[in-house]
Structures are given as structure tokens and as C-alpha cells.
Image: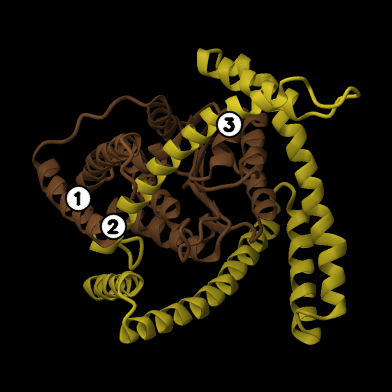
Amino acid sequence: MRYLTAAIAIASGLIVLLGYFYPLDTLIQLRVMLTDWVVIIAAMAVLVGIANLVLVHTDKIRSGEKNSIYGVLLIVSLLFTFVAGLVFGPNSQFMRVAIDAIIVPVEASLMAILAVTLVYASIRLLRRRADVMTVIFLVVALLFLIAVMPTPIGPVPGDFLLLQFLQMFSDGGARGLLIGIALGALLTSLRVLIGIDRPYGGN
Amino acid sequence: MALVIVLIAALLLVAFTFLRRRSPAVLRPIQAFERLSHAIGLAVENGTRLHISLGRGNLFTARGGSALAGLAMLRRLAERTSVSDRPPIVTSGDASLSILSQDTLQAGYKAAGADDQYRATTGRLTGLTPFSYAAGAIPVTRDENVSANVLLGDFGAEAALLAEAADRENTHLIAASDNLSAQAILYAAAQDPLIGEELFASGAYVGAGPSHEASLHVQDVLRWLVILAILVGALLRMVGVGF
């Protein structure tokens, strides 16, 4: 069974990869078919994930863990939204209101907390790691903020030059990091494609 | 051309893997991984947990690479913590990744001969949007007797909330992301951030096998080739050769 799952995974990976490089009709058809299967499996995975989430919170409620009241709230809202989605459809007015009135404001407030969290983290950075790179990091962040912030006298003199100067280093650094990440991702994917790493089928 | 690069990389990977089986690689010390080893030992001794968060990397997109790196690391961590009374908790923000994390945990325990340690509820999907994922993962850090947090995978700005939660609970945090914004945020917010491709080196540093060490060597070879190509390209442009 272990070898069968590996063979199926490797063959599927190779077909999709070759389909990108050689756009032959057969390969494209196979690629589209595999991608369609993936979409269906991914949708089922969401249902399994949600069932797992309910199981986790049911366990917490049953064992009377700290803050398990939030688990009750989560399960009730989940069931209510799920049933409403099935009855009224995902594009109904009710579901839109649920998203616009609950999910969007909650996520926006988390975004606001994030801004405060980042300022606080930057302030504590020198206490946590006082080295040259930290100082450079904070000075660059500060210079960038000065260059882009609105002032009563209009733009800060020399802001364009400052931004150009910072952009030069940040672009170079970002490209270097992205090349490194791309190479890392390539090798990680190759390990799976060759079958050395098998994050499926109990390897 | 791209296919040739992929083929060369695959051949080098296989060749270096065989080489590494005979002589293990000597890796440069990275503080974050040294602290991780210490944190694992401490968690096992103290009866506390590790919280491993794999991010939101969808395996069907280009972000899947970081998710796979996280799973490789998870497999090794599951084996190493199998003697603990409290198994690690794995959170993720993608349904497929969540299922794979459960499978990886189970495989890790099986390999360590501790099948009975596995609980399906230790691999959790905490949310499907960036902030719901973070909001679902924060209580794990707070309420589940966690002594160390490992964030490894595809994160965005929400990583700051997870880092802040770890800091507030005074727990150890090792963090890496393939996303540049998240890397900048984690540099400011985490005690031990991993920068750039260090995320993909995690398997080699936790002893996941010769293939992970071989991957680092192949990355080095390819990196030198990229540097050479950039220098030659710049030189050709300078002398007026267009391409």
C-alpha cells in the first residue's frame, strides 16, 4: 500500500509538471482532470477539517477545560451558519449580512490590533536583541516612515532621494531572499516528487 | 531551460543523498535550531507541550513548498517528543495541510514505536482566513500548557499576533516564513527568527535524514550558478551585448 500511494503521487506530480513544460493535448487533459480531482478533494478536506474543529471543542467542553464557553459559542455559530448556508444558499442576503456584519468587522479589528502589536514589538526589539542588524533594521524603518509620513509643510525635503536609496537596498535584499526561498521550495518539492519525502500514506 | 534546471537539481539531489549517507554533513550553527533542541528536551522533561503552527500554505499553490518543509520538520519533532506525556499540538490554516499534519504526526509516532500517543485532535484546523487562523491558534499557546512555539510555513502579517501571544505567555518562539512581509514582522517580533531559505534547512538541522542535508548542498550549488549567471549577465550588458 505504501508503494502504491507513492507511485500514484509521483506519477500525478510528474504528469502535472510535464503538462506545464510540454503543452501537449493529452498532458493538458490529464493535468486538468487531476486538478479537478484536487478541487473536489480540497473541498472535502475543508469538511473534514471543520469536523475535526468541532471534535476538538466538544472534547474541551466535555472535560470542562478553561475557556470552554468559547467552544460552545463556536459550535453553535458554526452549526447555525452551516444550516443557514444550506437552506438559503451561500449567496443569499442573510449570508452576506453574516459576513459583512460579523466576519469583516472582526477581521478589521484584528488588523487594528496588529498595527499596535507591531509598534510594541519594534519598541521591545532593542531589549530582546541588541545587535548591529537590529539597529540597522530600526533605523531603516524609522527613515522610511519619515520619508512617507505627511507633515504640515508637505513632503519632507529629500524624501524622494531617501526612498530611492532605501529602495535600492530593500529590492536587492528582497530579491536575494526570494531566490533563496525559490531554491529551497524547488528542492523540497523535488524530494516529494522523487519520493524521498512522503508526507502522505503514513511514511 | 527550466526543465533542464529541474532535472539537474534532481540528479544532484540523488547523488548528494547517497554521498551524505556515507558521511554526514557539518552544518553551520544556527541559534534558533540549537534553542529548538533545548526546548524539545525541556518540554519532554517538564511535561509541557510544543505548539507547531504550519501556516496557511495551500499545497496546490506555489506556497506549498513551505508547507512541505513544515511537515518534514513536524515528522521529526513528533518522533523526538514521542516519549513525552503531552504530545505536541499542530495548528494550520489550510484544510489539506491539517489532514496531512495529522497523518505526519501519526507516522512520526509509529516510527518511534509509540502509536498509542496519537490523538486526531492534536492536528487542528483553526481557521480558513489569515486572522481566523491566528485567532484559533492563539488559545493553544495560552491554554494548552505550551512551553515552546514553532511557526514554520506560509504566514502573512497575522504571524505578529501569534508571536505576541507566545511572548505574553513567556514561551519560547522559533519562527520562519516564506513570505517577505512575515519575515520582516517576525524579525521584529520573534526571539529566534529564521530568515530566507533557513526555513527549508529546518529538516537538516533536526536530523530528518541525508536527503535534507543533500538538499542544502544542492541549494548551495544552484545559488552559485545563479550568482554566476547574474554576474555574466551584468558583464554582457556592460559591454553592450543584449539578450
Q: From the viewer's perspective, is residue A90 above or below residue A162? A: below
Q: Residue at x 76, y 20 (%)?
A: A157
Q: Mark 2 belongs to which subunit?
A: A
Residue B210 in percent (x, y) is at 20, 44
Which residue occupies the foreground of this view, B47 or B198? B198
Residue position marked by numbered label 1 in the rendering? B13
Q: Residue at x 58, y 71 (%)?
A: A46
Residue position marked by numbered label 3 in the rendering? A167
Classify mark 1: helix, strand or loop. Answer: helix
Classify mark 2: helix, strand or loop. Answer: helix
Q: From the viewer's perspective, is residue A159 above or below residue B60? A: above
Q: Residue at x 57, y 34 (%)?
A: B184
Q: Which residue extends farthest right?
A: A152
- Which quadrant, please, contains the C terminus of chain A? bottom left
Q: Is residue B158 left or right of residue B67?
A: right
Q: Colour of chain A?
A: yellow
Q: Colour of chain B?
A: brown
Q: Mark 3 belongs to which subunit?
A: A
Q: CA distance from mark 3 to mark 2?
A: 34 Å
Q: Which mark is residue A190?
A: 2
Residue B215 in percent (x, y) is at 25, 45
The three-letter amino acid code for the residue at tag 1 is: Leu
Residue B83 in percent (x, y) is at 37, 43
Q: Report which quarter residue A192 is drawn in.
A: bottom left
Nearer the observer: mark 3 or 1; the answer is 3
Q: Is residue A195 left or right of residue A90?
A: left
Marks 3 and 2, the one that precedes in the sequence: 3
Q: Is residue B87 left or right of residue B236?
A: right
The three-letter amino acid code for the residue at tag 3 is: Gln
